[in-house]
Amino acid sequence: MRDKPAMRRVKNRKFGAKGGEATRARQATTLAILQVRPLPGDPTRGTLSAGRSVLPCALGRAGVTIRKREGDGASPRGVFRLRGGFYRPDRFLVRPASALPLRPTRPQDGWCDAPRDRRYNRPIPLPSDTASAEALWRDDGLYDLVIDLDYNRGPIRPGRGSAIFLHVARAGYRPTEGCVALRPGDLLRLLRRLGPRTRLAIR
């Protein structure tokens, strides 16, 4: 979902994969479940529990809802699998280590957010003359590293929300437009412990 620009560049000079680290990450035991819960008194911020780690996170500007709609600014309640992710190749020295499939983004990558378009909630090339779409190649750093959540994907329901990701948080954990967001270093380290069997639960 769209967020206002305010994020610095992210590089994995310290945390990036080297040598056979990506292979070792795939062989390591992955987390079964990530638990996201809003903070009492502030529904736009929360915690993400990953094993013994508890990480601060940003949530949608409208908190969490079970009746998600396109543009409502809320994070959807539910349990979602991780479909994979993408990263900015010019912001990382090497591909981040993870058992999840990751692909580099390109300047022409977009994500359709037009409910009446047949490509709704799917990646599409930019520029698009026929549909509204969100750019995945951003200058604010929020999509430098992204995990695609399996929200509204099978089947895709028009108007029920698009581009729900786990991505980089803005400074101060300011609210998202419906995604879950983590500090860059936290997201990069967490990625090493995620795999195709990991589920993310937004309570």
Image (cartoon, grey):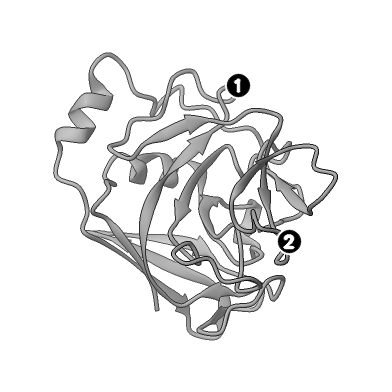
Placement of 65 over or under 164, stated as above or below: below
- Where residue 198 sits in the image (x, y, percent)? 27, 55
Residue at screen point 53% across, 66% down = 156
Amino acid type indicated by mark 1 = Asp
Q: Secondary structure at mark 2?
A: loop
Quick one: quadrant of the C terminus?
bottom left
Given residues 9 and 139, the one toward you in this image is 139
**SS at mark 1?**
loop
Left or right placement of residue 192 versus residue 31 in this view: right
Residue at 39% in and 50% down: 83
Q: CA distance from mark 1 to mark 2?
A: 29 Å
Instruction: Please provide percent x and percent y for residue 188.
Output: 41, 39
Neighbour class for label 2 at 10 Å: few (<14), some, many (≥20)? many
The picture places residue 125, in percent across and down from the top left corner, at: 69, 37
64 w.r.t. 106: above or below = below
Sequence order check, earlier mark of 1 and 2: 1
- Which residue does the numbered mark 2 point to in the structure image? 114
- Residue at the image point whose x is 85% and y is 44% from the top: 129
Quarter in which the N terminus is drawn = bottom right
Residue behind mark 1: 90
Residue at image position (71%, 56%) is: 2
| Amino acid type shown at disc 2 | Ala
Please say if 118 is above or below 158: above
Q: Is residue 177 above or below residue 197?
A: below
